[in-house]
Image (tube, rainbow, N blue to C red):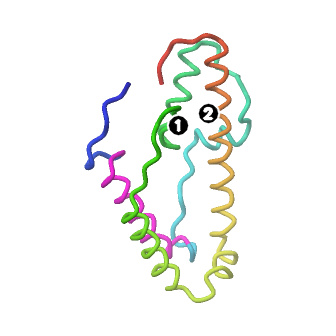
Amino acid sequence: MKPPTTPDEPGGRWGEAKKKAVDIGSQPARDVGMSKREIPPILEKAFDNPYSLQGLKTCKAIAGEITQLNAVLGPDYSVGNEYTENRAGKLAEAGGKTIINSIIPFRGLVREMTGAAPADRHMNAVVDAGLARRGFLRGVHLRQGCKTRF
């Protein structure tokens, strides 16, 4: 089991807040097509074929791919973990998004015209495929009786 993160680590509370703040602040640049999000290759691979076992003959290989997916998707669901929410952080995030989203008039139309909306839909699709692949690989890992950790 991994030790808990501290608030300043990338997976900690402040690391997450910083990541969200940067994402919210860069939204207008993405909306007008000046900036694009990079899609990690592991997610593109999952999008192409989420249920492939090609090249994954060993428990170590399966665990390695799950680890790569965890790195881009965040931690997977764990039974018994208590759900906690940072209410103040969620309110700040909602306020920041509201302000940023009001900067560009006719934002929805602009996003469609610049390709930002289709790019976001593709990003959502590759994330969904990555989540499906991770779940599939965890099932294969369990079914094969693997003991490797990820």
The percent position of residue 80, horizontal first and vertical second, equals: 49, 33
Q: 25 or 132, which lies in front? A: 132
| Point 74% across, 36% down: residue | 49
Left or right relative to 19: residue 6: left
Left or right relative to 134: residue 86: left
| Point 57% across, 74% down: residue | 31
Left or right relative to 88: residue 8: left
Residue type at mark 2: give it. Answer: Arg
Q: Residue 115 carries which label?
A: none
* In the depicted structure, whether residue 112 falls above or below residue 10: below
Dot 2: element: helix
Q: What stretch is highlighted in magenta?
A: 11-30
* In the depicted structure, whether residue 140 falls above or below residue 42: above
Q: Where does label 2 land, which residue?
A: 134
Q: 96 or 60, which lies in front? A: 96
The answer to which quarter of the image holds residue 91 is bottom left
The question of residue 18 being in magenta is answered with: yes
**Dots 1, 2 in contact, CB < 8 A:** yes
Q: How crowded is mark 2: few (under 14 residues within 10 Å), some or many (20 or more)?
A: many
Which is in the foreground here, disc 1 or disc 2? 1
The answer to which quarter of the image holds residue 122 is bottom right
In which quadrant will I find the N terminus? top left
Dot 1: element: loop
Q: Residue 76 carries which label?
A: 1
Which is nearer the N-term, disc 1 or disc 2?
1
